[in-house]
Amino acid sequence: MSGPDNSESIAQAVHSVNESAAPARPAFVQPRTYLELSHPIATPKTLSPIDREQMEGLRIIRAFLKVRTSYDVLPLSFRLIVLDTSLLVKKSLNILIQNGIVSAPLWDSKSSTFAGLLTTSDYMNVIQYYWQNPDALDQVDQFRLNSLREVEKAIGVAPIETVSIHPDKPLYEACRRMLESRARRIPLVDVDDETQRHMVVSVVTQYRILKFIAVNVTETEMLGKSLKDIGMGSFSNLQTAHMDTPVMDVIHMLVKKNISSVPILDTDGHVLNVFEAVDIITLIKGGSYDDLNLNVGDALLKRSDDFPGIYTCSPDDRLSTIFDTIRRSRVHRLVVIDENRHLKGMVTLSDILEYVLLEGEEDEN
């Protein structure tokens, strides 16, 4: 029954009761106030066919995530590197480089508990500390992973929230926790049946989740609206740099704005490249901080030969096309450019995941 019809029938019922009631009513009784809605009934949106198809595609993706677990995302065979919190920071850096990874779960062997996730943000904090205390290089070399929280306090940055999830929980819940904590990856932590102690199973990234969707949900083809139409991504107040920008200036941008990359432009505003947070790991390998004095152009020359390059798109590209790109390639962000290669915006995996999970969810519920 619709809202207006329901109100009318209630009003008629109250009216008939009032007619048969005694003429004198207590002054505090105001039936009308109980009939008035605190919030007016919103007029249902009229959706176009492409809007309806878009919403249906998103509903199917969310339903898929709610019946799949984080275990389902894991490959049949994988390697997990877990670092003890007593390890020196510079040794942990070498381990990441040798194994071709950019993050690792931390384990406190004294308490036998999961202690968080080591990421490039932690190394940037150490760099910031060194930059503020250039005479403390010997001290920086002796930093251990269990002292990273002290580094955060010393440079005045908020500690990164430690989040994890049981691998049997729905993948949808893992995605929501990542969005709420602004994390780009989430460790899967199980409990041993015999010892009742926590154990780290793996780490699930935004990229792996979105690729899992792209490979298994054919209804991503229904997401036919363009980036411009859905307003996904960042298109104003973008942080940018040039090839001659000092690396430390870019690191300050990454930390201050809590972003993972900065587009590199030429003097005419054309996109040339992207400096990523993971590029910092290469610059400080072996515990040397000398390369931080380089400019961006020289720093990018130190990338490995198998660097896949940057991915671009236009504001008119459809979300279905973006998912197709994720299905075929290892994409971590897309630089939005116009036909002349001028920078228009940035689309991150966080933007895509947030849109998929939240867009139209209230109407769906």
Image (cartoon, helix red, strand yellow):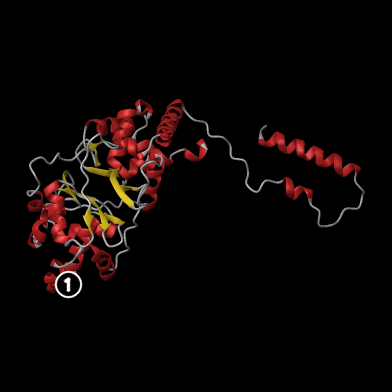
Quarter residue 80 falls in: top left
Which x, y percent locates residue 280? 15, 54
Who's the residue at 25% across and 32% down the image?
A: 325
29 shown above or below 125: above
Left or right of residue 257, residue 13 in this image: right
Circle 1: element type: loop
Residue 103 in the image, given as x and y percentages of width and height:
22, 50
Q: Nearer the viewer, residue 182 or 81?
A: 81
Asked if residue 317 shows in the view, the reply is no
Residue farthest bottom in this picture: 135
The residue where tag 1 is placed is: 133
Residue that appears at 73% across and 45% down: 35
The structure residue drawn at horizontal position 74% and vertical position 48%, both measured from the top left corner, is: 34
Local packing at callout 1 (Cα closer than 10 Å; few below 14, some 14-19, many 20+) is few
In this rendering, would 185 be left or right of 339? right
Q: Nearer the viewer, residue 172 or 68?
A: 68
Picture residue at 70% right of the left edge, 46% below the top: 36
Q: Residue furthest front?
A: 194
User: Residue 303, how many percent across, how many down?
Assistant: 10, 47
Q: Measured along the vertical axis of the image, is residue 263 above or below residue 330?
A: below
Q: Which image quadrant for residue 216?
A: top left
In the rendered image, the quadrant that contains the N terminus is: top right
The residue closer to the viewer here, 123 or 21, is 123
Instruction: Judge from the rendering whether residue 363 lies leftward or rightward of residue 53; answer left or right.
Output: right
Residue 216 in view (yes/no): yes
Amino acid type, callout 1 = Asn
Residue 189 point in image, percent of width and height: 33, 48
